[in-house]
Amino acid sequence: MSDVLCIYYSFSGNTRRAMKEIAQQLDAEIVAIDDGADRNGFSGFMSAGRDAMRRSTAPLKPFTTDKPIEEYKMVIVGSPVWAGRCASPIRGLLKRRGLEMSRVSYVITRSGTRRCESVYDQMDLYTKEKHMFEVSLQPGSVGYAFWRDKFVGDVKQYLEENNG
């Protein structure tokens, strides 16, 4: 059973790909969440941005983890950036379960060149403690693998130093 949980939401597949790569390198449990909202087409894209701007959330579909969230040594939350904010399903997860996450780190994926670092502070509003590590990834960019691997290295070092 893993000591690391990677939990994420992905619509386009970019966050899913990044989280699968990270989970594989950390030998972590990986769980996708979904709120069941239809975000297909232009109207879905616009409603996703509107939901993010309004900070609205919908109930999440049920998901399971191998053990209670608070028992993981690290919970890594992955979210795409929508309108400069975390995705609505991730905000919903953090609002409902964030207080169970005392050792949390963030992976955000973005389409633009701006790193969107304010998203981390937005996500910290709902967790028990401030995040430990973060990475802002732009799929297809030159630095993608470097920053992903640096994030993984930082998490591994923390886990090794705090394993006993």
Image (cartoon, grey):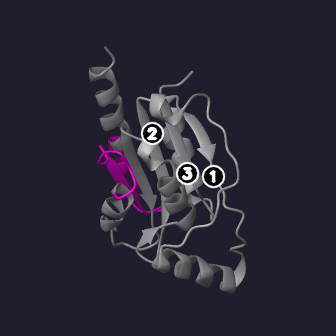
Mark before the other along the chain sequence, 3 or 1: 3
Mark 1: few, some, or many residues within 10 Å (few <14, many ≥20)? some
| Left or right of residue 63, residue 69 in this image | left
Amino acid beneath label 3? Tyr
Q: Which residue range is magenta in the image?
A: 125-150
Residue 113 part of the magenta segment: no
**Looking at the image, residue 123 lies above or below residue 161:** below
Residue indicated by mark 3: 8
Instruction: Determine the secondary structure under disc 1.
Output: loop
The location of residue 164, given as percent across then percent down, is 31, 13
| Left or right of residue 118, residue 142 in this image | right
Q: Nearer the viewer, residue 61 or 116?
A: 61
Asked if labels 1 and 3 touch by Cβ distance under 8 angstroms, the answer is yes
Residue at position x 72%, y 63% in the image? 36
**Looking at the image, residue 4 lies above or below residue 105:** above
Occupied quadrant, residue 47 = bottom right
Residue indicated by mark 2: 75
Quarter of the figure with the N terminus: top right
The location of residue 8, given as percent across then percent down, is 55, 51
Residue at position x 30%, y 67% in the image? 118
The location of residue 48, given as percent across then percent down, is 58, 76
Residue indicated by mark 1: 33
